[in-house]
């Protein structure tokens, strides 16, 4: 489909006219819903107006945003390192893969809520609990994606580089890791949105800082506008992180036609 | 170009390679009882029909596969058993260019030099020199997808020569290119191989190519059975057409016999 080559990606990095119109339309529909909520039998506080949400946004504490951001980025980096490291060992050893893979599949099937409960029951310290949950959820995704990608590196390229007799580290550094980079970036994209959602739930349950904790406070105070404001911040944070990732992707994969 | 040590002789003795098919479990004899000697600096063309075991022989010679029985000995060492000892000694050009798509032309040429641990400045200098020799001085920063098929194969040839190997192996390296480009690259490859003093082994299914490049033509039948070992210089220069016909007749007769046995 040659036409597709000229079609801009719908989630492109810049704010196109279409994006702005779409967001504006959403805001108008929201405001109309807010005005007509009582007429629809919905309590007025349940759908706060944009002005009220704007006032709540002014009360956002940057420290909580920073803490959540640090937790997400830190846990993702740790998950990435552990996932890729284990994938590398499994790629090198069929035996290890045969024994470890069923275990990984089992861990991937455990729901996030169960991980949070395990973390609360097993560990003390909010930071450790949150990191544990995030790594338990995101680590296996990195591992499985990396292992699949390693297995998918074309045989022709593997034989070519082997004919030059690289050492084991050279084989990975010169061929395998650069070859799987596009897949790793895709894993980062998937895990980023996953981690943002998981960290919020984890902070709701077991933290005294962070966006999740602030959402819990807003819910206790019955302040729907604050819930909306913190949710907006969370969405904006995800968009920002995705934009940074797209920038890195563009730079790292500049060789792609 | 640095003066090169004499390449070692290659001795193939009672070589046998059997593959077991994954699905049927049946054994396939790719090479059976092959004996062969290749002298230092010789340019040898190995010719045979598709499926005769040429590429298996190529894999065994570069040490990517272990023989089932028999041996390949290069200068007293085996390319599979003493794998690391041949680092920087053997270089290959494959049927497809097999360039790394994320590396520019110069970085692709640098790859084997990085693997042998050459200093960064020397890597760059030597890669540039080889790209220049192959007429790609203006394309050093181009990625493989920005180059034509012929240009990509030139980069692959530069990559093979960059390590100044003592043995060069090419597996159907020009077969996928158009005739003009293939002939041009073949000539370049041979001229460089002779200039470097490397032993060069070209595997091909094209008789014209085999006759055109080799000091010696080794004709293989099914299971790499040695059908003929021809020293081209002993053949009268004006009678290459007859040589071609003779090789073709040998291959056809072998194929007929193989069919009768089956």
Image (cartoon, grey):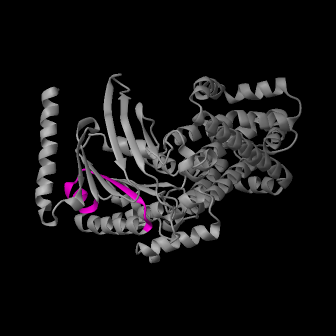
* Corner quadrant of residue A25: bottom right
The residue drawn where x is 57% and y is 73% is B125
* Corner quadrant of residue B174: bottom left
- Residue A257 appears in view: no
Q: Magenta span covers which residues?
A: B196-214
The picture places residue A190, in percent across and down from the top left corner, at: 60, 44
Determine whether A115 is above or below B230 in the image. Answer: above
Q: Residue B202 or B153: which is nearer the viewer?
A: B202
Look at the image and tell me in which quarter the C terminus of chain B lies: top left
The picture places residue A139, in percent across and down from the top left corner, at: 68, 37
- Decide if residue A205 is on the left or right side of residue A105: right
- Residue A146 appears in view: yes
- Decide if residue A65 is on the left or right side of residue B90: right
The picture places residue B91, in percent across and down from the top left corner, at: 46, 55
Q: Residue A227 or B57: which is nearer the viewer?
A: B57
Q: How many marks?
A: 0
Determine whether A111 is above or below B182 in the image. Answer: above
- Decide if residue A143 is on the left or right side of residue B58: right
Queried whether the magenta region covers residue B63, the answer comes back as: no
- Decide if residue B116 is on the left or right side of residue B257: right
Q: Residue furthest front?
A: B234
The picture places residue B52, in percent across and down from the top left corner, at: 26, 40
The residue drawn where x is 23% and y is 52% is B230
Q: Residue furthest bottom?
A: B138
Queried whether the magenta region covers residue B209, the answer comes back as: yes
């Amino acid at each position: 489909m040659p036409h597709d080559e000229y079609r801009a990606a719908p989630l492109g990095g810049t704010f196109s006219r279409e994006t702005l119109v779409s967001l504006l339309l959403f805001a108008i529909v929201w405001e109309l819903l807010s005005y007509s909520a009582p007429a629809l039998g919905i309590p007025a506080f349940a759908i706060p107006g944009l002005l009220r949400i704007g006032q709540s946004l002014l009360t956002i504490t940057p420290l909580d945003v920073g803490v959540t951001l640090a937790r997400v980025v830190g846990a993702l980096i740790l998950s990435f390192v552990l996932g890729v490291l284990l994938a590398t060992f499994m790629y090198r050893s069929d035996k290890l893969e045969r024994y470890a893979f069923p275990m990984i599949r089992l861990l991937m099937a455990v729901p996030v809520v169960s991980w949070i409960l395990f973390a609360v029951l097993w560990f003390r310290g909010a930071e450790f609990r949150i990191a544990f949950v995030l790594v338990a959820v995101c680590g296996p995704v990195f591992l499985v994606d990396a292992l699949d990608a390693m297995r998918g590196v074309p045989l022709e390229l593997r034989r070519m580089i082997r004919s030059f007799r690289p050492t084991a580290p050279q084989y990975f550094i010169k061929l395998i890791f650069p070859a799987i980079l596009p897949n790793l970036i895709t894993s980062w994209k998937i895990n980023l949105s996953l981690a943002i959602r998981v960290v919020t739930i984890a902070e709701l349950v077991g933290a005294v800082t962070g966006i999740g904790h602030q959402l819990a406070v807003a819910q206790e105070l019955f302040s729907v506008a604050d819930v909306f404001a913190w949710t907006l911040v969370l969405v904006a944070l995800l968009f920002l992180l995705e934009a940074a990732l797209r920038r890195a992707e563009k730079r790292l994969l500049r060789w792609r036609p | 170009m640095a003066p090169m040590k004499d390449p070692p002789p290659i001795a193939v003795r009672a070589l046998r390679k059997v593959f077991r098919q994954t699905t049927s479990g049946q054994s396939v004899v790719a090479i059976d009882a092959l004996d062969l000697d290749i002298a230092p600096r010789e340019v040898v063309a190995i010719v045979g029909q598709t499926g005769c075991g040429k590429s298996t022989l190529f894999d065994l010679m570069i040490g990517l596969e272990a023989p089932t029985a028999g041996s390949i000995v290069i200068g007293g060492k085996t390319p599979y058993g003493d794998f690391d000892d041949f680092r920087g000694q053997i270089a290959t050009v494959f049927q497809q260019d097999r360039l790394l798509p994320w590396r520019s032309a110069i970085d692709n040429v640098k790859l084997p030099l990085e693997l042998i641990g050459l200093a960064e400045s020397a890597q760059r200098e030597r890669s540039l020199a080889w790209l220049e020799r192959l007429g790609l001085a203006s394309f050093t920063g181009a990625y493989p997808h920005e180059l034509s098929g012929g240009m990509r194969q030139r980069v692959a040839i530069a990559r093979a020569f960059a390590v100044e190997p003592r043995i060069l192996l090419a597996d159907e390296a020009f077969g996928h290119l158009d005739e003009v480009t293939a002939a041009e690259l073949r000539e370049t490859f041979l001229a460089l191989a002779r200039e470097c003093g490397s032993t060069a082994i070209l595997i091909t299914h094209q008789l014209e190519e085999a006759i055109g490049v080799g000091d010696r033509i080794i004709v293989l039948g099914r299971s790499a059975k040695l059908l003929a070992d021809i020293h081209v210089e002993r053949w009268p220069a004006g009678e290459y057409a007859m040589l071609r016909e003779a090789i073709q007749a040998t291959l056809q007769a072998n194929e007929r016999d193989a069919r009768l046995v089956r």
